[in-house]
Image (cartoon, rainbow, N blue to C red):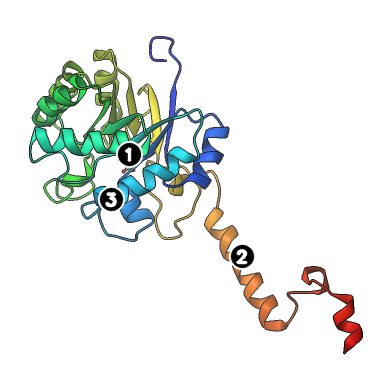
Amino acid sequence: MKSRSERIVMLTCYDALFARLLDAQGVDILLVGDSVNQVLAGAETTLSATLDQMLYHTRMVRRGTSRALVVCDMPFLTYQVSKEEALHNCGRVLAQTGCQAVKLEGGVHVAPTVRALVDVGIPVMGHIGLTPQSVHALGGNRVQGRDEIAAQRLKNDAKALEEAGAFALVLELVPAELAATITNSLRIPTIGIGAGPACDGEIQVLHDMLGLFEWLKPRHAKRYAEVGKLIQRAVAQYVAEVRAGDFPTDENCFHVPELAERR
Ligand code: KIV
């Protein structure tokens, strides 16, 4: 797609119900992000996401997908400890969920692991810039690569991942100009989130773009709907109607005439 200048559309997805809806609309890649730990499980960060959690959600997404590529985000400490553990855990994800690729966070330091995975036939997507599993080391969810040294480090990370065999790269919270430079320097596609329009594709957190969070509106996201408000209105009406005795009505009932006669 990069060589044809076709932009790549990617969204997070955590279950079969949404996977069917997104797949039908032509989304190219569904990422079972470890953000599931925040979005659905209510945790503060992605750090406590587990391999079992990712296996469970990735299986569901795969069941609902017939066209899109499904990528599973490897959770914290499932690939950083040793290459052997990374091979074992990523292999398990591919074998037990039916997804086609994994995503790892990190640059130069994770490149040898990426090489080892690619060598055994596991497709790997990289992720640099703001890497949420390092949120504490990075001092919060901040834009990365803001000075010359940090920008050069990200360029080196991107090159190292490409050379290690990654098939694509997520750039998260990176200045648009730097994302453009990195994108132009690589043969593999970049997928941006908060990284400007020059990336080869875009990823967003589904629940952000649907407006499911009432309390959070990240600057890099655009709300395409207000589904959270819609749900609240529907549930408020249900609560009111049940309390008032307006639901269920006769339309929602089943009648057995013989029973009525016997009374
Ligand atoms: O976990 C996730 O949802 C992600 C995306 C934000 C890229 O890693």
| Percent coordinates x, y for residue 177 in the rendering | 28, 24
Q: Is 20 or 255 nearer to us in this picture?
A: 255
Q: Please, what is the three-letter code of the amino acid marked with disc 2? A: Arg
Question: Circle 1 sits in a helix, a strand or a loop, which is it?
Answer: helix
- Residue topped by disc 3: 52
Report the residue at 88% width, 83% height from top: 260
Alpha carbons under labels 1 and 2: distance apart: 39 Å
Q: Which residue is mark 2?
A: 233
Q: Label 1: few (<14), some or many (≥20) within 10 Å?
A: few
Of badges 1 and 2, nearer the viewer stands 1
Are the residues flagged by discs 1 and 2 in contact, CB closer than 8 Å? no
Q: Tell me: 138 left or right of 126.
A: left
Q: Indicate the quadrant containing the N terminus: top left, top right, bottom left or bottom right.
A: top left
In this rendering, the answer to whether 258 lies above or below 3 is below
Residues at discs 2 and 3 in contact (Cβ within 8 Å)? no
Which residue is rendered at x = 13% and y = 26% of the image? Answer: 111
Residue 166 point in image, percent of width and height: 24, 22
Indicate the secondary structure of the residue bearing disc 3.
helix
Determine which quarter of the picture holds residue 178: top left
User: Which amino acid, mark 3?
Assistant: Asp
- Which residue carries the number 1 mark? 96
Residue 7 location, quadrant:
top left
Can residue 62 be seen here? yes
Left or right side of 260 for 89: left
Question: Label 2 vs label 3: CA separation?
Answer: 35 Å
Ligand 1 in which quarter = top left
